[in-house]
């Protein structure tokens, strides 16, 4: 195996699992460590495209509760997800040596529930919410990782599949039924149960008991947990609700769970604050100085070339001779070639008009949320148009939404013999609830539909709102 994946240098293997291998890598451009998970691509083209779409969708989740994906690199046979490297330990390692306090359990559950809430906004089912996929940071917070087997929820896209761990299975998963976000809530309930009592709810003799999982309720927590430990009744009731066999009887979102967790957290003594960092610190993995590549002279890494002529094909020898040409000659030839290419592209772009149609924007803002005064439905459309003009030279606005007295915009005079590209239809929505806003935009063209969304906060500056709207719009084309 090469020691590089794209621009990322591989340092060592972190973990090898059924879904792929995880390596510690180093990004020399930003001078930071990264985690790189490598998957073998499926054999068919359609499933490859689906996997890439899901990888890009997961990468769009931006939250401190989720391990961030920095890059997606594809080759003919493999896919690499370049992720945020989280120092600390995973929850499996933590639970192997410690029975966490109630404050730590609630902190972990609240962070994981928040991560699942964001995944639900993008209709993502994680499918493997287990202790090994929850990372505990040095700051004493939890991050959910490994969406590698996640899929878009919905009956039309569901299929028979199993999670990577028996501890994360829901009854419907085991039975091969279509899944939605409630399967993740079941797994989170089982994880909460284990953190509180130290036992897997549906395991017997060290393994999963399928009949217990599908038909029988787990042992009551009060029978397992020591009598000296006070279990909040509302938390126990919520865990039981999460582990209902019938998905229809479970909560449909994480909101009721998060409300219970916040109430429990507020009832705990202030001295229990940040207990997770204190309890987990003895189990943090040791960081080695060898995990940072040694510095070498830049000239060798960037400009160093072999001084020996190649013994190989005619094309290799021709390339070698070209490299011997002096830099001024090389630069002049490159500039000439680029000018010819730019001229051809300029003619094509100059003579193309892009028809655009907007649906009426959908907005929903809670009464207690105060947004920057400039934000409105009309402003959203205008900023999307402004972003589109950065990509297309000529826009023609079709329909009434977003139209202006002159609806064709030219940056360099009236084009001659102009052509129309296929019409692009846009839908824009802004929803604000519980102190955060979600901006969503979709584009449909030639029968294909693309979707992007971003999270904003009401107290962001007007310029930050504008930048996020622009970036999210342009991300539809990446």
Image: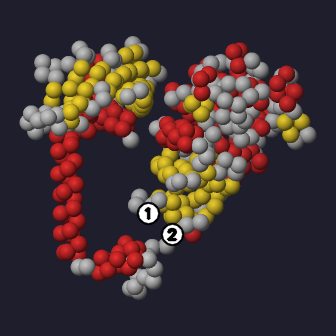
Residue 389 point in image, percent of width and height: 22, 34
The extreme left residue here reads 413
Can residue 145 be seen here? no
The extreme bottom residue here reads 308
Who's the residue at 47% across and 59% down the image?
Answer: 6
**Which label's residue is closer to the chain start, 2 or 1?**
1
Q: Nearer the viewer, residue 463 or 24?
A: 24
Q: Is residue 214 above or below residue 96?
A: above
Residue 431 point in image, percent of width and height: 41, 20
Can residue 50 be seen here? yes
Q: Is residue 181 above or below residue 273?
A: above
Q: Quadrant of residue 286?
A: bottom right
* Secondary structure under the numbered disc 1 in the rendered image: loop
Callout 2 crowding tier (Cα within 10 Å): few <14, some 14–19, many ≥20: some
Who's the residue at 80% across and 38% down the image?
Answer: 198
Relative to 333, 262 lies left or right:
right
Relative to 341, 68 lies left or right:
right
Q: Nearer the viewer, residue 200 or 52?
A: 52
Q: Nearer the viewer, residue 212 or 64?
A: 212
Q: Give the residue at mark 1.
A: 28
Q: Quadrant of residue 151?
A: top right
Who's the residue at 45% across and 73% down the image?
Answer: 295
* Secondary structure under the numbered disc 2 in the rendered image: loop
Q: Give the residue at mark 2.
A: 293
Residue 273 point in image, percent of width and height: 60, 38
Q: Nearer the viewer, residue 444 or 58?
A: 444
The reply to whether dot 2 and dot 1 touch (C-beta < 8 Å) is yes
Residue 49 point in image, percent of width and height: 52, 40
Who's the residue at 87% across and 42% down the image?
Answer: 206
- On residue 386, the disc is none
């Amino acid at each position: 195996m090469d020691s590089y994946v794209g621009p990322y240098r591989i340092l060592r293997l972190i973990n090898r699992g059924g879904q792929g291998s995880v390596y510690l890598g180093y990004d020399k451009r930003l001078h930071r460590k990264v985690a790189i998970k490598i998957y073998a691509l499926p054999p068919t083209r359609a499933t490859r495209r689906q996997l890439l779409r899901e990888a890009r969708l997961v990468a769009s989740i931006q939250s401190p509760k989720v391990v961030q994906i920095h890059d997606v690199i594809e080759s003919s046979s493999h896919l690499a997800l370049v992720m945020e490297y989280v120092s600390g330990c995973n929850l499996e390692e933590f639970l192997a040596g410690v029975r966490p306090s109630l404050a730590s359990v609630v902190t972990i559950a609240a962070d994981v529930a928040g991560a699942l809430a964001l995944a639900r906004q993008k209709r993502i089912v994680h499918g493997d919410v287990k202790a090994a996929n929850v990372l505990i940071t040095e700051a004493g917070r939890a991050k959910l990782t490994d969406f590698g087997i996640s899929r878009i929820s919905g009956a039309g896209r569901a299929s028979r599949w199993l999670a990577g761990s028996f501890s994360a299975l829901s009854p419907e998963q085991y039975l091969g039924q279509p899944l939605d976000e409630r399967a993740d809530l079941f797994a989170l309930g089982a994880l909460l149960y284990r953190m509180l009592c130290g036992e897997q709810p549906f395991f017997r003799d060290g393994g999963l008991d399928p009949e217990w999982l599908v038909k029988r309720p787990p042992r009551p927590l009060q029978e397992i947990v020591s009598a000296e430990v006070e279990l909040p009744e509302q938390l126990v009731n919520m865990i039981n609700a999460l582990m209902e066999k019938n998905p229809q009887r479970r909560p449909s979102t994480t909101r009721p769970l998060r409300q219970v967790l916040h109430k429990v957290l507020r009832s705990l003594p202030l001295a229990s604050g940040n207990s997770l960092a204190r309890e987990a610190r003895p189990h943090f993995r040791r960081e080695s100085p060898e995990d940072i590549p040694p510095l070498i002279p830049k000239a060798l890494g960037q400009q160093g070339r072999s001084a020996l002529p190649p013994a190989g094909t005619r094309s290799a020898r021709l390339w070698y001779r070209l490299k011997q040409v002096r830099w001024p000659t090389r630069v002049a030839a490159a500039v000439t070639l680029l000018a010819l290419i730019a001229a051809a592209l300029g003619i094509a772009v100059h003579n193309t008009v892009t028809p655009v149609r907007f649906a009426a924007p959908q907005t929903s803002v809670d009464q207690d949320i105060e947004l920057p005064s400039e934000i409105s439905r009309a402003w959203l459309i205008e900023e999307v148009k402004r972003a589109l003009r950065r990509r297309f030279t000529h826009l023609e606005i079709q329909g009434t939404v977003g139209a202006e007295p002159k609806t064709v915009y030219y940056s360099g005079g009236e084009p001659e013999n102009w052509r129309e590209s296929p019409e692009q239809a846009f839908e824009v929505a802004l929803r604000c609830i519980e102190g955060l806003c979600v901006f969503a935009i979709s584009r449909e063209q030639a029968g294909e539909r693309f979707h992007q969304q971003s999270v904003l906060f009401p107290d962001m500056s007007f310029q930050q709102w504008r930048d996020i709207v622009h970036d999210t719009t342009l991300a539809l084309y990446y």
